[in-house]
Image: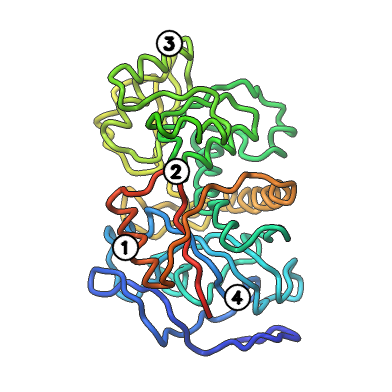
Amino acid sequence: MPSATDTTFHIPRSHTAILQHGGTLKVVHNVPVPELLPGWLLVRNAAVALNPCDFKMAARFPTPGLKDGVDFAGTVVAVGSKESAFSIGDRVFGCVTGNKQDDPESGSFSEYVKIEDIYALKIPNDVSFETAMGFNPACVSTIALALHQCLKLPATPDEVTEKATNQTDTVLVYGGSSSIGLLAIQMLKLLGKHIVTTCSPHNYSLVKQYGADAVFDYHSPTCAADIRAYTKNRLKYAIDPFGEVATTALCYEAIGRAGGVYCALEHYQESMCTRRAVKHQFIMGPALLGRGVLLPEPYGVEPDPELHEWSKEFYRSLQKVIDGGLPKPLPIKLLPGGFDGILAGLELLKTKQVSGQKLVVKLEH
């Protein structure tokens, strides 16, 4: 492993990680520490956040030896390039691609994490590692891609200024109390959008605290009709984090008479897309990097050099937003147990026992 200059951190040859093993996820010791490459950082992990993709992708594409996890926060212990904007000792957070078919070392559920320095984010001085996980980095990239590629809307305040877009657009975010829903609401509010969302009544105050302008109970049989009436039959944009039959149907019914765009963050049944005036698209968050996603259809994505360049601009703009005190971190629930706590937390997500909180696990060294 190339050594960075003047480091005070001892970097071991092996560490502990959560890998795919026999169709399940397992804590494995003595895993080689990722090799440091030019343009990359090696980070000693301090905290991770849990996401549904952590158990979903491992189950859908079982491949022994792949590392799981996407979100992390920690301390830079090695820098691969002298030109890097980062230094050893910097506190950073971000997301990487877990269960990566063409790079088994990629993933965040480990004592050490590698990340390209252009996609790492510095943690504000007054923010802890655990709280930084409330920024929801994996969801940030997914929502950014949804705005940019699917809805064709600006994804950063810089773009709003440059393009002078109409900021009065209304966007429906289904499931606003989910972690990705709360993040989407904040990003859209930052861009000046009017936000309609759905959730259970006990989470109404939560989603309004994060910027929702109007909230509807998705349990109500008139939910879609109520949204359509509220938006005067003019709603054009809908973001659906779940892609389930019921969620797709509600979004399609809520979109106004003139049509619009349905953006799903999970694969959905195209047979539900019954309105020609409504365009529909499935977004894969890892595609934001523009390097493609090596998976079977419908999850595979071809490389996109233009998207790669845009993603770098997005992260530079995102760092400025974070330095300015936004977005507001999501409520977190800190789970004990280190790596075993990660596996227990994924079971909570899998059985849908989490609402309005981001599960975070602190890693001890």
- Which mark, by number, is residue 356? 2
Of callouts 4 and 3, the N-terminal one: 4
Amino acid type at mark 4:
Leu
Q: Amino acid at mark 1?
A: Ala
Q: Are marks 4 and 3 in contact (CB under 8 Å)?
A: no
Q: Considering only vertical position in the picture, is 160 above or below 100? A: above
- Mark number displayed over residue 112: none
Q: Nearer the viewer, residue 291 or 40?
A: 40
The mark that comes first in sequence, 2 or 1, is 1
Q: Nearer the viewer, mark 4 or mark 2?
A: 2
Q: Kindly state the secondary structure of the residue where label 4 is placed.
A: strand
Relative side of 114 to 198, left or right: right
Gap between marks 1 and 3 measured at Cα: 41 Å
Instruction: Compute the Cα span from label 3 to label 2.
Output: 27 Å
Estimate how packed mark 2 is, as few (under 14), some (14 to 19) or many (20 or more) residues with alpha carbons within 10 Å: many
Residue labelled with disc 3: 229
Kind of residue indicated by mark 3 = Ala
State the CA–CA distance, disc 4 to disc 3.
52 Å
- Residue 200 vertical position relative to residue 74 in the rendered view, above or below: above
Circle 3 — which element? helix
Check residue 58 in the rendering and tell me which mark sits there, or answer none.
1
Residue drawn at (34%, 27%) of the image: 218
Residue that appears at 48% across and 14% down: 231
Q: CA distance from mark 1 to mark 4?
A: 24 Å
Name the colouring of the figure: rainbow
- Kindly report the distance in space between the C-alpha atoms of the residues bearing marks 2 and 1: 24 Å
Label 4 sits on residue: 42
Residue 348, position as x, y percentages in the image: 32, 55
| Residue 68 at x, y percent in the picture | 40, 67
Q: Secondary structure at mark 2?
A: loop
In this view, the residue in front, 95 or 103, is: 95
